[in-house]
Amino acid sequence: MVKTLAVLLALCAVAHADDDDGLDDGPPTLLGVRIAGGRLPIFHEDMSTLGLGLGLDHPITSRLHVFGEYEYVWLSPEEVSMQHGTAHRVLAGLRATLVQKREHNLRSFIDVEGGGGMAIVNDTVMGTRAMQTGFTGLRAGFDFLADDSPSRVFEIDLIVRAVFVPEGSGVMTGVDLQWGN
């Protein structure tokens, strides 16, 4: 996990645009927000999750991006009980474009992604714990290019991820909105 994060940081430090993607000064760094939901096994309990996240996506090439995310997550058990909780999750990852199609100022794409990070989980029954988390997933979406706007790119994605935590694995789906210089 630590080696993966070190490699991601090194790639970000030496990032440059190798491919021509139609933008005259390179592909933009994107800032975004996401809302997502799913199920995860937390403290040996199947929990429903609802998360609100912030992300930063930096292109290494037009088809390979490194990204980082912070997410605040609300947790509630499958069965009705007094148990509930919250989590702060920080992730880093790589995403690679599998398929893309351009038409004028619109690009549609399907990306594969993977990465990992840490979460601080606070539960009313078990208390506060730190846990490692990993993920792999797919993104499908569109981005719009606008040459006459300060935000040259607007991107909307549907994300589906398999999330891995020490107690097992779960699924997360969400909608991500990003914009860039």
Image: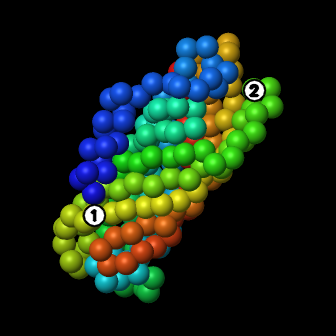
- The residue identified by callout 1 is 132
Q: Are marks 1 and 2 in contact (CB under 8 Å)?
A: no
Using the image, determine if residue 3 lies above or below residue 146: below
- Residue pushed farthest right? 103
Quadrant in which residue 81 is drawn: bottom left
Q: Residue at x 68, y 25 (%)?
A: 145
- In this picture, residue 8 sits left or right of residue 36: left
Q: Earlier in the sequence, mark 1 or mark 2?
A: 2
Amino acid at dot 2: Asn
Residue 21 rendering spot, x and y as whole percentages: 64, 25
Which quarter of the rendered picture does the N terminus lie within? Answer: bottom left
- In this picture, residue 158 sits left or right of residue 69: right
Residue 10 rendering spot, x and y as whole percentages: 30, 36
Callout 2: SS: loop
- Whether residue 120 appears in this view of the structure is yes
Residue 167 rendering spot, x and y as whole percentages: 32, 78
Front-most of 69 and 74? 69
Callout 1: SS: strand
Quadrant in which residue 174 is drawn: bottom right
- The residue identified by callout 2 is 105
Q: Marks 1 and 2, Cα distance to the nearest angstrom?
A: 40 Å
Q: Residue at x 45, y 55 (%)?
A: 114
Q: Residue at x 46, y 73 (%)?
A: 170
Residue 107 rendering spot, x and y as whole percentages: 72, 36
Front-most of 120 and 63? 63
Amino acid at dot 1: Gln
